[in-house]
Structure formats: C-alpha cells, structure tokens
Amino acid sequence: MRWLALLAAIWAAPAAAEVIASAHYEAATARYGHGALAGGEWAELVLVLAGGEERRFALPDDMVFEDLSPRLADLTGDGIAEAVVVESHVDLGARLAIWGAEGRIAAGAYIGTRHRWLAPLGALDVDGDGRLEFAYVVRPHLDAVLTVARFGAEGLTVLAEAPGLPSHRYRSGVLEGGIADCATGPVMLTADSGWAQVMAVRWVAGALVREAVRGYAGPTSFAEAAVGMGCTLTTP
C-alpha cells in the first residue's frame, strides 16, 4: 500500500502549496486620491503561500486596494482561508472582494460613487451553521450601514443591513470596532452614529439587533466593552 500513500502525497502537495499563510499590501499609491483611510491606498496584493512562495497581484490603474491589511478567513467553506480585501474603483467607489492563491474569486457590488468606502469589521458565523460570513460598514462616514454578507454560488450576497453603526473616523489610520468572540456567539461591536456609545450588534432571526453597552472614550473602548461582556475582541 506504499504506492497508494505515495500517490496521496503527490496529489496533496499542490493543494498544500496553495494554502495562503499570510497576506499584505505593497506599492502605496496616490492615484486614487481619496485619503479617507490614512495610509490605506495600495496598488498590489501580496499572498505568501505555506511553502514560502509569493503571489503578487497588481490592480489596473483605475483601481486600488483601499485598506490597511488583508484579512484571512475561509469564506468559501473549503477549509482553506482566502484573503478578504477592499477594492476601490476611480468612478464606482469601494467593494468587498475575496482572493485566493490563483487570483480574485468573487467580489460584491461597488458602492457606485467615487470616493465612497467600506470599512471591514471581520469574519463571523452569525447563524451557527459552521460557515463564516463577513461584516463590514458601508459609507462609515455618512450613513454607516453595518452589513453582513455571505459567499455562495452567486458570489457575495448581502444577508442583513443596519444603518447608523460606524467603525472608522474620517482620515484616521485606525479601524475601530470588531468582532467579539462570546460564549453565546459572535457579537459585532461598532460606535453609535454620534460616537457616544459602543454598540453591541447581534444577529437575531435574520436581523441585526443593537444594544448600547458602554460609553465611547476612544479606540480602546471596544476591547474594554468586550472584556466587560466576558468576550474577546478580534480587531479589524
């Protein structure tokens, strides 16, 4: 049976080599010129595979990665993490996209207007089915719509939205809020529309239900809120 084990190892090797171990952005650029996220506009995505190989992907001149760092999460449910990124188009604004070792796998809809952005919050399993969804805030400096989306056969599908829940201050280089890992399930943490309160947002029967849990006193307020809830915060 040694030849069977050898064949299994040969077949498994390419798959193992395609596993993304880490990801980052390079080639800072001013060609988009938005500046809403300080230090957050890039021309290239770099994926580092488990075997050490680097895969580099450059966007066309009318697009940038508008983000601080890619997030690794298995949104396709295949057991291998993808890189979740924010892409912005010169005329259409931002969208959420998923990249694998071979390139872009799927992307959501563009916001539709130049210099309109979305702030990633993080991956979470909102309904307890073992599959990860992704939370992000669309137009965080305007109506701040907290959005939960799922990857499926048709790409990214929005499952729920709730306005008035920002997670980023205009021109800041810090993303705030995040996902709180709690014994009762994941909780999304954002600010309220006036940045006076930390809001805990839960998925309840397909809707996003919010609750003020403490006053907002700066970026550390979200981690402090998570501790007060008996949870651990995953930063965006």
Image (cartoon, rainbow, N blue to C red):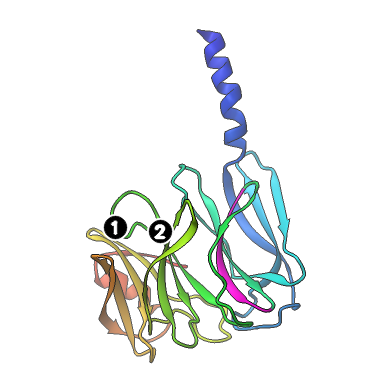
- Compared with 9, 144 (above or below) is below
- Compared with 80, 214 (above or below) is below
Q: Are marks 2 and 1 in contact (CB under 8 Å)?
A: yes
Q: Which mark is residue 127?
A: 1
Q: Residue at x 50, y 86 (%)?
A: 141
- Compared with 55, 108 (above or below) is below
The picture places residue 104, in percent across and down from the top left corner, at 62, 54
Q: Residue furthest front?
A: 154
Q: Of the residues shown, which amino acid type is indicated by label 2?
A: Glu
Left or right: 62 in relation to 143: right
Left or right: 192 in relation to 93: left
Secondary element type, mark 1: loop
The picture places residue 49, in percent across and down from the top left corner, at 63, 44
Q: Residue at x 62, y 37 (%)?
A: 17
Q: Quadrant of residue 161?
A: bottom left
Between the C-alphas of marks 2 and 1, the distance is 9 Å
User: Is residue 196 in the magenta section?
Assistant: no
Q: Of the residues shown, which amino acid type is indicated by label 1?
A: Asp
Q: Residue at x 58, y 25 (%)?
A: 11
The picture places residue 42, in percent across and down from the top left corner, at 69, 69
Task: Answer whether residue 219 is visible to the viewer in this image.
Answer: no
Left or right: 170 in relation to 228: right
Q: Residue furthest top?
A: 1
Residue span colored magenta: 91-100
